[in-house]
Image (cartoon, rainbow, N blue to C red):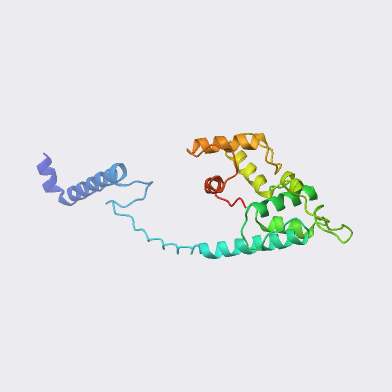
Amino acid sequence: MLAAAIVRHPREFVGIVMAFAATVAIFVNALFLQSGPHPAPIFATRPFTTPLPRPHPVPALAPAADAHGQAEIVSEIQRALAARGFYQGPVDGIWGAKTDLAARQFAQAAGLAIDPAPNDKLLHAITSAKVASPQAPTAASPAPAHNDPIAALLAPSQRVLAIQRALADFGYGQLKPTGTFDTETRAAIEKFERDRGMPADGQISEGFVRALAAMSGRPLD
């Protein structure tokens, strides 16, 4: 009967077969071939992507230029501190113990709650403040008639002050940075020397100063 029907109606049979094939293709496409909502291509294709342009690398600043600019800032700070009587060392652009001590003395005299660091902020604070070191020589203060060696030994020393700060920063006792060589400073030096296998005499020798400066990474003179 099916064959007779096909013979009698060949065109209709061909149309039914094509419609059935189209229906099957639509279902296969919808269920298995497309990744997004309809319409989608019957056969999956590889997506076409345009390569993004590679960003140009940003040139890094030269370390030498940064170091040169930092040295200029430190030199300006040293000049400003020297003009106000807080600094008596050379203007060499090196942030050493003398420069650090002078900056801290200025901050204390000016009543500034800042941690002195070699930057433009500190330079602006020094140049805009109207303070001077109480130890700065003035025209009214007479020069000393003679040198007193005993008073020179008892006077605060910038070198001792820098040593006390370095020892306290690295945990060798709770030292107060007074600049005076006392028993606490001697005990801290002895502990430092014992930790490094040095003769523990507690004195500020050149070998001790070199070892402490190498550990702290800053000069102590």
| Relative image position of residue 101 (x, y in whole percent) | 69, 50
Q: Is residue 107 visible?
A: yes
Q: Quadrant of residue 143?
A: bottom right
Instruction: Tally the numbered discs.
Output: 0
Q: Judge left or right: residue 165 versus residue 37.
A: right
Q: Is residue 75 above or below residue 102?
A: below
Q: Which of 55 and 39 lies nearest the eye of the viewer?
A: 55
Q: Judge left or right: residue 76 versus residue 211.
A: right
Image quarter (top left, top right, bottom left or bottom right) of the N terminus: top left
| Residue positioned 77% across, 62% down in the render | 83
| Relative image position of residue 17 (x, y in whole percent) | 19, 47
| Residue positioned 66% across, 34% down in the render | 183
Q: Is residue 61 visible?
A: no
| Relative image position of residue 180 (x, y in whole percent) | 70, 42
Q: Is residue 174 above or below residue 220?
A: above
| Residue positioned 67% across, 40% down in the render | 181
Q: Is residue 174 above or below residue 4?
A: above
| Residue positioned 41% across, 62% down in the render | 54
Q: Which of 121 and 154 lies nearest the eye of the viewer?
A: 154
Q: Which of 4 and 157 lies nearest the eye of the viewer?
A: 157
| Relative image position of residue 67 (x, y in whole percent) | 56, 62
Q: Judge left or right: residue 216 versus residue 27.
A: right
Residue at the right extreme of this rendering: 140
Q: Which of 52 and 104 lies nearest the eye of the viewer?
A: 104
